[in-house]
Image (tube, helix red, strand yellow):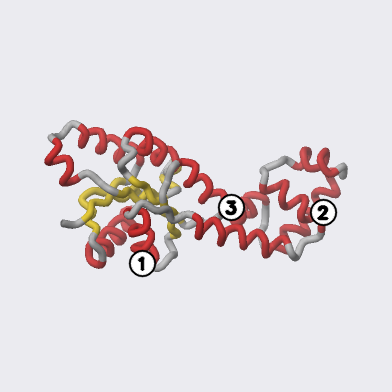
Amino acid sequence: MKNILYIVDDHNMVRNGLKAWLEQHTDWRVPKDFASSKECFDYLRCLSELEEKLRKEIFPEIIIVDVQLIGETGFALVQQIGKKYPEIKCVMYSMFDTTGFVLQAKDSGAKGYISKVAKEEELAHCLEVVQNGGTYLEQYMAEAQNKVDSIVTVLSKQERNIFEAILQEKSNKEICDELFISPRTVENYTSRLYAKIGVKNREELLERYK
């Protein structure tokens, strides 16, 4: 008997492609997929009202949840599932593998985190690890931290200070007060910092390295 898995992703093509690959190449069956967290949680609530035998036949062991859904993130859904249905394990699926996203996934209760650009074999391995009671988070946390470490080596001491302050989402005024430098000096250092690490603005830096 195949294991049951659901998918929550706001892109229909992603859901269909992922479902087709899993059902063709693994022991996972995907009887339901959803475009939003509300659709998923409402369906789980309906399952709770079914007879035990029927419920077991379609109740998921794992749910793959996209980090970025339309108008929301998947983190809240993972938290809800963890509180209401602790027997379900969640794996977060995302284009982003930065430390910030992986830590949020871990804090929300996710047991796994996988990049959408990862090879299919890695996804299958992630699901196997999570199914067997393990977690698949540390790999991405280490990789994301390595990205930050490699950047820090090419920055001056003051640029590193500003880089770390931006990662903590401190404002330019807070950086001025903390480092005892003028707003113009912060702007100059920030411009050089962006040029060195190849980003255009603060938002892009946070998206890539946080």
Asked whether 104 or 182 is in front, the reply is: 104
Q: Is residue 22 above or below residue 84?
A: below
Q: Which mark is nearer the camera, 3 or 1?
A: 1
Are there few (<14), some (14-19), or many (20+) residues within 10 Å of tag 1?
some
Q: Which residue is mark 2?
A: 158
Image quadrant where residue 56 sits: top left
- Kindly check if marks 2 and 3 are in contact, taking CB atoms under 8 A apart as contact: no
Give the Cα distance between marks 2 and 3.
22 Å
When asked about the image quadrant of residue 116, the answer is: bottom left
Q: Quadrant of residue 209?
A: bottom right
Helix, strand or loop at label 1? It is helix
Dot placed on the residue nearer the N-terminal end, 3 or 1: 1
What percent of the width, then of the height, locates residue 141?
54, 56
> Gap in Å between the C-alphas at discs 3 and 1?
25 Å
Residue 55's place in the image compared with 26, above or below, is: above
Q: Amino acid at mark 1?
A: Glu
Which label lies toward us, 2 or 3? 2
Q: Position of residue 12 (x, y in %)?
A: 31, 53
Q: Position of residue 40 (x, y in %)?
A: 30, 40
